[in-house]
Image: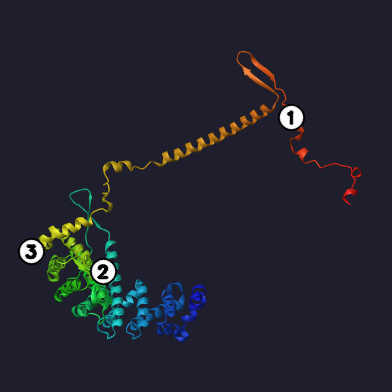
Amino acid sequence: MVTLLLTRRQKQMVPYIFNAKNDCKIVDRLVHHVYQKSLSEFLNKLLGLNHADFEGELGQIIAAKQKQVIGKLIEKLGSDEIEDQLNATTLLSENIENREYFNIIAKRENLTQLFEIAFSHVNEECRKSGLNVIVEVLNVFIEKHRNADHSEEPKKAINESEDYEVVQQEEPEHVESPEEIAISQILMTYIGQLPELLSKAPNYRVNCAMADGGLEPLGQYRLHLTRLVNLILKFNKDELNNELLANDIFRNLSELITKHPWNNFFQLKIISIYEEILEHSKDAQFRQKALKSSMIVETILGITESPSFTFVSERQIRHGYMGMIIRISNSLQSAQHNQEVADFLDNSGEQWSKYVKGDLKKINETNNKKLGGQEPKAPGPSDEEEQTFEPMDSIMARFSNFSERSSENNQDDDDDEEESEEFDSRATETRVSITNQSTGIIEVEMPEEETEGAHFSGNIYWNRKPVFDEAEIDLSDFE
């Protein structure tokens, strides 16, 4: 009901909620009871208000209170109540793309508090919530910077020796923002803890048909850590990349590949990490060191020795991580235009070359086969010629011709109806004129047709009422 009132009676409700006389205690109580889902949704409505829509002091009060709420929600991530953590995480994640809220969360003190919750808190659920918000912050920050880089227009320079302009793709100097500096420095502090956190498995097991005693899960926390590594790579900063190498992060991830063959979400993050290293990394030396320290080739060759999983019934299926292994193998082969990658694969030994020419080639051929045995027809030059578009003038001319023909047909139908009516009127006449070229007009007298029992035809006879004289009828016999 209150949410409905806020939507329909905003001018009355907003001044009442953000009342400076009572220090906006209503908003404070909403934050205190954020564990209630309905109240957290109402609080989300208040965070979605645009303070610029309200004039004077009210707009300033709304803006100041909204910033204060964001800070309190970050504190709620460290609460012992799981509902507080979940709803606070949801509110921060949904509003993080708001520039004003992002600037608040990305402040050094708030980021430090988030990292302390994510890496050092006793409660595992608190660590998950804090790490989830950190990942969202980094993701939004990287996307905004990449969009800003793509929006830069190329600068034009005049070639002095020629009379034409040459467009030079000059990269503008990158100026680090305060948020970027704070994020980089804090990441440098906490990257050293990643190996230990990645090696800690959850203290429970999951029942699964793939393992008799249960399956050791990867867990959401380690999945978020893997995503964090991927986002660190997207920063493309030498100091961060070197810190990842110094702590053997990529080797730890390769060990997790073999331990968790059925976690598709983790495998997608691993694929994204190697695509970032092979395709987007600007440092050739880092690329070579990362591939060597990850032991990815040894991991791939070890996995392909037993690509199938056998059930107790001796039925076999392909291992869950084989799709990821094939994807990374093809990415390595495609990246050999980089000399450091080509040298790395050449030094991997004969076993890698045998795998590429044997198993990898067969699997790629199988995956590229079309279902049903039908090969799609490749578009040729004749197909392009056939796909020429007809000018609009000819199309409109066809429509006009069609409308003219339709009107002519309607006129002909009207003439035919008039002729048929004249023919019917002439047929009813007793005298018929017949034209003969030799004799001219011959008049013929048509005799009238005599029908037997003509007085019985029609409705006149059958609708007649009997006429009799009551005096002639003797009713004594019926008494």
Identified by mark 3, the residue type is Gly
Answer with left or right where residue 80 lies relative to residue 272.
Answer: right
Q: Up-down: is 101 above or below 358? A: below
Residue 169 x/y as whole percent: 22, 58
44 vs 359, nearest the viewer:
359
Residue 452 badge: 1
Q: Classify mark 3: helix, strand or loop.
A: loop
Q: Up-down: is 474 above or below 196? A: above
For marks 1 and 3, give the CA distance. 118 Å
Identified by mark 1, the residue type is Glu
Specify the quadrant of the image occupied by residue 90.
bottom left
For marks 1 and 2, give the CA distance. 98 Å
Residue 343 badge: none
Q: Earlier in the sequence, mark 1 or mark 3?
A: 3
Residue that carries the numbered disc 2 in the rendered image: 264
374 vs 275, nearest the viewer:
374
Q: Classify mark 1: helix, strand or loop.
A: loop
Instruction: Point out the residue furthest to the top here.
Output: 438
Answer with left or right where residue 7 lies relative to residue 317.
Answer: right
Q: Up-down: is 383 above or below 370? A: above
Identified by mark 2, the residue type is Asn
Instruction: Work out whether residue 178 can be spotted.
Output: no
Looking at the rendered image, the disc whose residue lies closer to the viewer, 1 or 3, is 1
Point 56% across, 32% down: residue: 412
Residue that carries the numbered disc 3 in the rendered image: 349
Q: Earlier in the sequence, mark 2 or mark 3?
A: 2
For marks 2 and 3, give the CA distance. 30 Å
Answer with left or right where residue 477 lies relative to residue 11.
Answer: right
Q: Earlier in the sequence, mark 1 or mark 2?
A: 2
Specify the quadrant of the image occupied by residue 284.
bottom left
Residue 89 x/y as whole percent: 34, 78
